[in-house]
Image: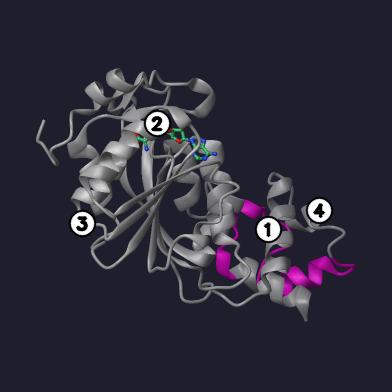
Amino acid sequence: MAQIDGLPPLREVIATHGLAAKKSLGQNFLLDLNLTARIARIPGDLSQADVLEVGPGPGGLTRGLLANGARRVLAIEKDSRCLPALAEIAEAYPDRLTVIEGDALEVDPLQHLTGPIHVVANLPYNVGTELLIRWLTPQVWPPYWQSLTLMFQREVAERIVAQPGGKAYGRLAVLAQWKAEARIALSLPPEAFTPPPKVSSAVVHLTPRPAPAFPADPGVMERVVAKAFNQRRKMLRAALKGLHPRIEDKLEEAGIAPTDRAETVSIERFAALARALQG
Ligand code: SAM
């Protein structure tokens, strides 16, 4: 294994600090520093950027980001056991790493960062999905972040990048791709982690579009898409009943056949429907 810095190997860090993985915190650690360095390169040049890292754990990805030249990293970690290991990294990279002990769902990173900001995280998938939705639905667009590089279960990653016509296509795909360009940047087998999870994982890279891909009121778009996929096996004229007294006319106005099902409708058509319902 190549040395990316002068710090001890991660297995040693884990043994020294007693960081046995806790299932309740979704702890599956990446111990291969070559791999974490590869993930750290996904957002591109970080020398002029701040990085928000969520869930650094023993710091494998943090070390990858710092070795890759990130100007500054703000890391939010819930497990206080990890703090001494992270403090050693902060010492090795003076003035470049700030660690906050806390729940990423509660800490406001903008209190601590100036930007441009790249977000990088290997999180338990439920926390990751919740944060992704928050990052995609801020008060103002474009958002504060320049990119998101996020590890998910492979199945969740596929739902984010899914195209119309398949089972994976749903709310997450429409929301993510309406607001951002999303791609799977790296796939990882369970054995890449310690302990290995039951399923494969993938890193998704998202960059925000300057404006949503097709114009529509975000609130109306969200309601339409949620309702359409809530009953995804129903024809849209039935699934969307209640949204408008003449929903069939509105569907046709948007270029959607009332007998279509949500999973075949493109993001462009959903936005057209949201506009038809707005106007
Ligand atoms: N980044 C490390 C790596 O790649 O090896 C650790 C990844 S591990 C899958 C997830 C990390 O997120 C753990 O360190 C866990 O303690 C932390 N975590 C879980 N829930 C969190 C939350 N709500 N806020 C901040 N950190 C959290």
| Residue 161, percent from left and from top | 45, 52
Circle nearer the N terminus (2, 3): 3
C-alpha gap between disc 4 and disc 1: 14 Å
Query: Based on the displayed image, in which of its 4 quarters is residue 1 positioned?
Result: top left
Q: Amino acid at mark 3?
A: Gly
Query: Based on the displayed image, in which of its 4 quarters is residue 99 positioned?
Result: top left
**Cβ at disc 4 under 8 Å from ligand 1:** no
| Residue 2, percent from left and from top | 9, 35
4 or 1: mark nearer the eye: 1
Q: Amino acid at mark 2?
A: Cys
Proximity of marks 4 and 1: CB atoms separated by less than 8 Å? no
Circle nearer the N terminus (3, 4): 3
3 or 4: mark nearer the eye: 3
Mark 1 crowd level (few <14, some 14–19, many ≥20, 10 Å Cα): many
C-alpha gap between disc 4 and disc 2: 51 Å
Proximity of marks 1 and 2: CB atoms separated by less than 8 Å? no
**Cβ at disc 2 under 8 Å from ligand 1:** yes
Q: Which label is found at residue 69?
A: 3
In the rendered image, is residue 107 in sight? yes
Is residue 75 rendered to the left or right of residue 248?
left
Residue that carries the numbered disc 4 in the rendered image: 238
Residue 276 belongs to the span the image colors magenta = no
Q: Residue at x 53, y 54 (%)?
A: 173
Magenta region, residue range:
244-268
Q: Which label is found at residue 225?
A: 1
C-alpha gap between disc 2 and disc 3: 22 Å
Residue that carries the numbered disc 2 in the rendered image: 82
Q: Residue at x 47, y 31 (%)?
A: 80
Circle nearer the N terminus (1, 3): 3
Label 3: state its secondary structure.
loop
1 or 3: mark nearer the eye: 3
